[in-house]
Amino acid sequence: MASYDKRKNHTRATIALPSHDQIIDSFSLCSITVKDQCFRARIYNIQGKGDAIFLLHGWPQSSISWQPFFDAAKDLDYKIIAFDQRGYSPGARSQDIHDYTTDKLVEDVFSIADELNISRFHLAGHDWGAAIGWAAVMSQPKRILSWTALSIPHSLAFFEALRVDKEQKKKSRYIILFRMRWLPELLLMTRNFFILRSMIFRWMPELHTQEYLAILSEPGALSATLNWYRAIGMSKKFPYNPIINLPVLFIWGNRDPAISKQAITLQDQYIKGVYKKIELDAGHWLLERRSNLVIDNMLKHIASVTKD
């Protein structure tokens, strides 16, 4: 049996959130509306004088995956923003695959920054959040102070590895499934999300898992998140420079089931600025399994870069 929350309890709770301009507390769940999209977000210290940090989550998670980072940085003066991206936020959940192309997902990042009156910021992303972050850095590098990517390498390196590396081809087979219509939804929702619970969410804190399931159990939500995969290759062309001159921190697990070592090696040719690459004896879920080490290195990386 597939699991649905027809009452849309997560949507109801999201609608009740205050707008970002009504925030009183230093940390808040809120909504941010840009154009015709309304995003659910976690924001800390938005009135602070320090640099802003944007955190992008991956599949099948939400902004709560970055809670360990919020906790670690709570005594610092950074403005920290993590938002539930398209498909995950109830107010930004189109069923049109073309609404999940890279150009639109990147535009969301900068549009939200504009709405918050943030011109330049540090950026970090994990999984799909890293993929979108790489595209953001390549397209508007002048707006990014530093870039931290977790697990997923430079986009051009990944696709090159997908062409030439047998290991990467094998590790990416799941993408073929996720790009199919209806079948992945049927498989993933069967027996109350048994596959996700047993293969992915078992690594997650229970509170985080509850939020992920609350999102994905709403009608149309899982399909919306899978549309990120279905929209691969559909993006409108936008200007970008694949050479990265910004300070880059890249952290990956050498037991990641989705990424080959060749993809990581191919990345080096595109990064010409300050570059630190950390290999961990870990899998894909770095924020959950290597939280302290990952966040300590992120904060050191961010602190080493100052605005002009």
Image (cartoon, helix red, strand yellow):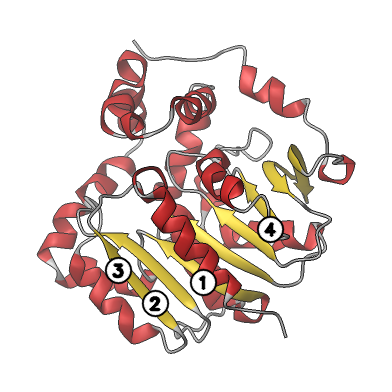
Q: Label 3's element? A: helix
Number of other residues with Cα within 10 Å of mark 4, as a class: few under 14, some 14 to 19, many 20 or more: few
Q: Label 4's element? A: loop
Badge 1 or badge 3: first in the primary sequence: 3
Residue 83, placed above or below residue 131 = above
Q: Are marks 1 and 4 in contact (CB under 8 Å)?
A: no
Q: Residue at x 39, y 77 (%)?
A: 276
Q: Are marks 3 and 4 in contact (CB under 8 Å)?
A: no
Q: Residue at x 53, y 82 (%)?
A: 246
Residue type at tag 1: His
Left or right: residue 51 versus residue 89 is right
Residue with the mark numbered 3: 159
Residue type at tag 3: Phe
In the picture, the disc for residue 301 is: 1
Badge 2 or badge 4: first in the primary sequence: 4
Does residue 127 appear anywhere in the picture? no
Q: Label 1's element? A: helix
Q: Label 2's element? A: strand
Left or right: residue 12 versus residue 23 is left
Residue type at tag 4: Leu
Badge 2 or badge 1: first in the primary sequence: 2
